[in-house]
Image (cartoon, rainbow, N blue to C red):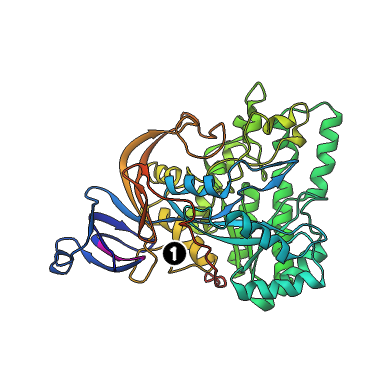
Amino acid sequence: MSTRTVIRGGLVITASDELHADVLIEDTRIAAIAATGTSAAEAWTAERTIDATGKYVIPGGVDAHTHMELPFGGTFASDTFETGTRAAAWGGTTTIIDFAVQSVGRSLREGLDAWNAKADGKCAVDYGFHMIVSDVNQDTLKEMDLLVEEGVTSFKQFMAYPGVFYSDDGQILRAMQRSAENGGLIMMHAENGIAIDVLVEQALARGETDPRFHGEVRKALLEAEATHRAIKLAQVAGAPLYVVHVSATEAVAELARARDEGLNVFGETCPQYLFLSTDNLAEPDFEGAKYVCSTPLRPREHQAALWRGLRTNDLQVVSTDHCPFCFTGQKELGRGDFSKIPNGLPGVENRMDLLHQAVVDGHLSRRRWIEIACATPARMFGLYPKKGTIAPGADADVVIYDPHAEQIMSAETHHMNVDYSAYEGRRTTGRVETVLSRGEAVITDREFTGRAGHGMYTPRSTCQYLL
């Protein structure tokens, strides 16, 4: 039995168009779009009709950077795949791409299998995986080819965290050379971790232990230096490069310069860098620990360069780097030593709303909102046009969004499994009302109607965004 749904009367917004249109869904896919009031749209019949009058009809968000259940600093990210994907749905995100982790001395396959086991049967929305490559060797390089064939087409490396995830320049170059051959995309955490560790040691020796010093030792120049180095290594390898969680003016400048030279270099930033700052890290009574993440929050003046980069397309994607740790019992591990505070912020539920606030505030157009939150991450990571747009044949991942509803963000009302909100008390305009994932209502008029296990693993093609 085929199930038909019609969404009537909304303003359909994609990365390229805005149109008052009705949307016909058959089973799990979008079947047709027709201007509201036309004979074609009026002729549609369906078992379910959703009235979107006065609302936006937008593609489900694609969050290309999350860390559910990530082991870090002797603890684990507090969101499971079940709680984290449910929170994603509440925030209008219908696809996440999480990171499977290779442990040093183990195979990529072992890490991928472990993450598949964590997620299988648990997710409320669809998901895929990137692969964190912690141990580059000949076997790892061969495995990269196999993973690309299977639909795991992106590999993350770290210039930070010596002794944990760190890769040296030689390992990075080898992985980039391999990705140039197999079509994979290298994602880079670009900070000079070796130099940062020296600054951490020196700060602690001076008795500088509060959370604000996390931001002071992870200097913007060391992000810029690593970004520059990663770009040059990618250029030598002839490989594309995607730099994650860009936070600093100087790093944006490195990306812009490379793109002006015609290189396949891309950048992602996150809501925390657009809306928070070192002022938060400096909050008294250890409250600043809530805002410890890497790359760190920067002084407020860096935000202008990030917004400008998003408008000029020197930054292409906004993801969350959602990696929540509770303040009580987890962030508190770093009392008296900022270097022991687990790195990460909650945000998977907040991204679409914060970026809509950016539309309200005049930083972005509505179409650019959809481009950086839905369409480009889908294209960047081989999911388009199945994900990231509203078009015939696309998955029916659709959000009915009320652009006028006001809300106050708070840990009291969010659905992420964490005991604080990074945006506590922030007033925003715009709110998710109903969310369809492959045609199934997972949020219905502000109530969760989804289920664990609805979300499907989604293999990906290679990057569709190359110059």
Name the residue nearer the viewer: 266 or 152: 152
Image position of 209 (left or right of 436): right
The correct choice, above or below, for 68 with respect to 235 in the image is above
Residue drawn at 68 percent across, 30 percent down: 329
Image position of 371 (left or right of 390): right
Main SS, magenta region, reads strand
> Per the image, is 278 magenta?
no
Query: Quarter of the image holding residue 418?
Result: top right
Question: Badge 1: how crowded within 10 Å, few (<14), some, or many (20+)?
Answer: many
Quadrant the N terminus occupies: bottom left
Name the residue nearer the viewer: 443 or 376: 443
Quadrant the C terminus occupies: bottom right
| Residue 274 screen position, x and y as percent | 53, 43
The correct choice, above or below, for 45 with respect to 217 in the image is below
| Viewer can see residue 29 | yes
| Residue 405 screen position, x and y as percent | 31, 38
Instruction: Name the residue beneath numbered marker 1.
Output: 387
| Residue 249 screen position, x and y as percent | 61, 47
Q: Which residues are magenta?
A: 23-28
| Residue 46 screen position, x and y as percent | 21, 62
